[in-house]
Structure formats: structure tokens, C-alpha cells
Image (tube, rainbow, N blue to C red):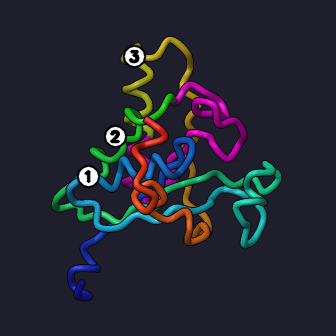
Amino acid sequence: MTNAENSKLEKATFGAGCFWGVEDAFMQVKGVKETTVGYLGGTMSEPSYKDVCTGQSGHAEVVQIIFDPQIVSYESLVNLFWKIHNPTLLNRQGLDVGTQYRSAIFYHSEQQKQIAEKSKSEITESGKFNRPIVTEISLVSIFYKAEEYHQEYLKKNGLSSCHI
């Protein structure tokens, strides 16, 4: 990509359980240019997967997305986020349990924050879920890229989604 093309791209970051399935879901979206799985929202510097799995680092497993807003809107990505996991489960998705599997939207701008909060309110008011939504909406902090073997894990290993 040229610098001009890169300057038009934006970032979005979501935590919705095991990052393998979350990444796979977003990789399928037209307009998503790149995905990177990693750790965000904790207190430990340079956490490893082992650190995150202990629950002591405070980080969530997340996918950071580079997308072209001329092709796919941030709002569309947030809508997909709500569809690929259960946002009423605190610190778990399916059989995965721990704070690293929490439901989280990490916003990169005030506009993203407003879109995420509005979307959360709308889904809460819709009655789609009969339990409270526990998704945190927080300003993005330091993103730590996960180990290389986690990147595009399902694709590399010929697996169907483990998540949705």
C-alpha cells in the first residue's frame, strides 16, 4: 500500500472471547485490510500468552483491525462485534473463562466512542438479550501483538471457526 492509501485507513479493536475466532470473523469483511491479534487493557508490560492466561496481567485477548472506512464503516464493524459473541457473559465466552475473554470495545477516537456507546444502548434497548450487557467500552491503550503462532491461527491450521 502507498502512504496515501495508508493515510485513509482506520483502526478498530475488539475483545469478544478467544481472539482466533474473532479475528477469523473480521477477516471475512470486505474493507478489512489487516487483522492482528494481541493483548490490551491490562497493567503488565510486554505480556506473553502465558501471562495473559493466568488472568494476572489484566489484558483481554483482542483483535486489532485496519479497515478502509470508504468500504466498511466502523458502525458495521461494531454491529458484527455484537453478532459474534454473547455480550451478557462476564469474563467468558463459551467454555473459555477468565478476564482475558471479556467483551470489550477499545475505541481509537471520540467518534468511535460515540458510535460504540450508541450501539450498546440500542442493543440493550432492543431486548435481544434478556440479561444485562457487560461489554466495556474503553479508550485504547498499549496494544501488545500476540505471538506469531496466534496470528491467523485458524487459517494457518486449516480449521473452521472455533468461536461463533
| Residues at marks 2 and 3, CA–CA distance in whole angstroms | 15 Å
Check the image and report above or below for 81 versus 142.
above
Look at the numbered disc 1 and give the secondary structure of its residue.
Answer: loop
Residue at horizontal 35 percent and vertical 67 percent from the top: 34
Residue 66 horizontal side relative to residue 93, left or right: left
From where the camera sits, is residue 21 visible? Answer: yes
Q: In this rendered view, identify the residue nearer to me: 78 or 19.
A: 19
Q: Quadrant of the C terminus?
A: top left
Q: Which residue is mark 1?
A: 29
Q: Amino acid at mark 2?
A: Leu
Number of numbered discs overlaid on the protein picture: 3
Mark 2 or mark 1: which comes first in sequence? 1
Look at the numbered disc 3 and give the secondary structure of its residue.
Answer: loop
Q: Which residue is mark 2?
A: 80
Neighbor class of circle 3 (other Cα within 10 Å; few <14, some 14-19, many 20+) is few
- Magenta residues (range): 87-116
Residue 146 horizontal side relative to residue 119, left or right: right
Q: Quadrant of the N terminus?
A: bottom left
In the rendering, at what x and y percent does residue 36 appear?
46, 65
Question: Quadrant location of residue 93?
Answer: top right
In the rendering, at what x and y percent does residue 70 appear?
16, 62
Q: Which marked residue is nearer to the observer: mark 2 or mark 1?
A: 1
Q: Which residue is mark 3?
A: 128
Q: Amino acid at mark 1?
A: Val
Q: Which marked residue is nearer to the observer: mark 3 or mark 1?
A: 1
